[in-house]
Amino acid sequence: MASPNASGYEQMQLIQADPVRRSISLLLTQIFVWPFVYLIFLMLLIFSKKETFRTETRYILFGHSLLVDLMFLFLTDFVVLLSYNFVLIPLHFCIPICIIMEAVAVSAPLTIGAMCMERYVAICMPLRHHAISTSRRALIVIIMIWILSSINPFVDMFILISTASHEYLSHLTHCHYEIMILERIRQFARGLLYIVGLVLILIIEIFCYVMIYLAARAASGDKKSASKGQRTISLHILQLFLCMAEVMCPYIEAVVMQYDIQSYLTVRFINFLAFSITSRAVSPLVYGFRDEKFYAAMAYYIRCKSNVISDIDKQT
């Protein structure tokens, strides 16, 4: 039976002991990851081709959320491929990967909060919306999101470099963020800080939802737009709950590990697919398929590609 404090390296040794489990887990990961990668890449391509998407605040934030999700999926799959093939790399090469993954993971809920605030301004302050929600301000918000999401990983990096020995920094390891925070109290503080941030974003989203609901009830409000805004924010709240569930998963897994290591590996993998991967598909589903303008552009792009392929087939 594994210790509740089993490291990522020890966990990967347990997976390596069962080649069938390893092969199935790796295959399922690719099946889940790559359709989402293709979908998000397609949406980013459409976003880059339409000037109206690149100049409107809501679509700029949406494009940023797509980029963040794509980076997260690529890096996650890269780390999974390394780990499941038992490829160890020097720790100092893992540090930049861990920093980027942590910054990307934290920027996702911050972007969700920014998108909710944009909908609040658009529906509850329609006369001031164009003055407040400009493309320049959207870019400033994105820069602020990256600054905020990068503070903690860079602090952890500086603490690690200043306190860890040269031998530790050069030893071979799997890439997981825990290699940067060796003290248990700092690991707990990291989780607590992330949860507090998610709760604050949730409060903002609930506030936006209530204000949009009140706008929908007002006779003078745009009820159709308000109703769509409510549904969009509801889906954003769902996405935020998935982020919260992802944070809580390690604590649940630690309890399961004390009773049965095989159940622990199964629960850990299911949590990974359900909350780390699937939650990244919610944002494309929210805007890509529910937004009429973006859906029309996507359908047009797919039809054009299909027609080109048909013409090539006829010529051959």
Image (cartoon, helix red, strand yellow):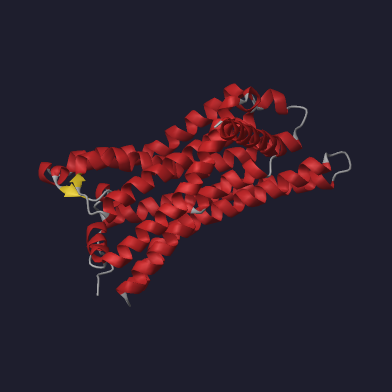
Q: Is residue 212 left or right of residue 95?
A: right
| Quarter of the C terminus within the rendering | top right
The mark total stands at: 0
> Which of the 4 image quadrants contains residue 3?
bottom left
**Image location of residue 304, percent across then percent down:** 64, 32
**Image location of residue 148, percent across then percent down:** 44, 36
**Image location of residue 78, percent across then percent down:** 33, 45
Q: Is residue 171 left or right of residue 299?
A: left
> Which of the 4 image quadrants contains residue 135?
top right
Q: Looking at this view, is 200 or 248 the one in front?
A: 248
| Quarter of the N terminus within the rendering | bottom left
Residue at 54 percent of width and 39 percent of height: 111
- Check the image and report above or below for 146 versus 22: above
Residue at 46 percent of width and 40 percent of height: 70
Residue at 75 percent of width and 37 percent of height: 123
Kindly give the residue lying farthest to the bottom in the view shown: 259
Q: Looking at this view, is 26 or 127 the one in front?
A: 26
- Check the image and report above or below for 280 versus 255: above
- Check the image and report above or below for 89 versus 268: above
Kindly give the residue lying farthest to the left in the view shown: 167
Residue at 54 percent of width and 37 percent of height: 42
Kindly give the residue lying farthest to the front in the view shown: 316
Kindly give the residue lying farthest to the right in the view shown: 219
**Image location of residue 251, percent across then percent down:** 39, 64
Can residue 176 be seen at all in this image of the molecule? no
Can residue 217 be seen at all in this image of the molecule? yes
- Check the image and report above or below for 271 versus 233: below
